[in-house]
Image (spheres, rainbow, N blue to C red):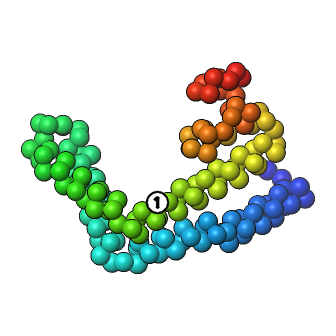
């Protein structure tokens, strides 16, 4: 790929967009929420223990009820998940993650649609599933529009 003036301009604009996104309230809120979760050593330990339990859960799932630790692991993972879900810092982090994802989805859609309405954009997030067929999905799938 040959670096042209046009490419340099595009890269400069991308860097500008990155700076704007990183200094946005949404990303700053996410960073604060992330810091609140992972600077709490007790909460970070619980998250680590839950991650380890998820690995055991996946192993147990391969064998189902026939695994000797099935009942213990199934109960333990539910208890740990509920405990984490009820933690205010974890809940705030999840909300902040969703907000950042929504922002990135929206920016990605705007960039794609500025190129052409036929450019496909990811359709797996709530942002895209709430939007109309005019967003360039072009799949003829779930939204019943035709390509």
Q: Position of residue 84 (x, y in %)?
A: 32, 62
Q: Is any part of residue 52 visible from this angle?
A: no
Q: Quadrant of residue 7?
A: bottom right
Q: Residue furthest right?
A: 5
Which residue shows up at 9% across the image and 44% down it?
A: 68
Q: Quadrant of the C terminus?
A: top right
Q: Quadrant of residue 88?
A: bottom left
Q: Position of residue 21 (x, y in %)?
A: 69, 65
Judge left or right: residue 54 versus residue 144. Answer: left
Q: Quadrant of residue 86?
A: bottom left
Which residue shows up at 27% across the image and 52% down it?
A: 55
Comparing 85 with 118, the one in front is 85
Judge left or right: residue 39 versus residue 144. Answer: left
The crowding category of the residue bearing disc 1, from other C-alpha atoms within 10 Å (few below 14, some 14 to 19, many at least 20), is some
Q: Is any part of residue 54 visible from this angle?
A: yes
Q: Secondary structure at mark 1?
A: helix
Which residue shows up at 60% across the image and 72% down it?
A: 28
- The residue singled out by tag 1 in the image is 94
User: Is 69 drawn above or below residue 50 in the view shown?
Assistant: above
Which residue shows up at 22% across the image and 56% down it?
A: 79
Q: Position of residue 70 (x, y in %)?
A: 14, 44
Judge left or right: residue 92 versus residue 30. Answer: left
Q: Residue furthest left?
A: 68
User: Is 56 drawn above or below residue 143 in the view shown?
Assistant: below
Q: Position of residue 97 (x, y in %)?
A: 52, 59
Q: How many labels sit on residues?
A: 1
């Amino acid at each position: 790929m040959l670096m042209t003036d046009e490419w340099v301009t595009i890269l400069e604009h991308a860097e500008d967009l990155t700076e704007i996104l990183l200094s946005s309230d949404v990303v700053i809120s996410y960073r604060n929420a992330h810091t609140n979760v992972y600077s709490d050593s007790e909460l970070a330990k619980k998250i680590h223990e839950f991650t380890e339990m998820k690995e055991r859960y996946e192993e147990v799932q391969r064998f189902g009820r026939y695994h000797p630790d099935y009942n213990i692991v199934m109960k333990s993972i539910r208890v740990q998940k509920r405990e984490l879900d009820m933690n205010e810092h974890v809940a705030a982090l999840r909300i902040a993650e969703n907000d950042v994802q929504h922002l990135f989805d929206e920016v990605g859609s705007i960039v794609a649609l500025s190129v052409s309405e036929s450019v496909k954009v990811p359709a797996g997030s709530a942002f895209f599933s709430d939007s109309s067929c005019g967003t360039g999905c072009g799949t003829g799938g779930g939204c019943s529009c035709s390509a």
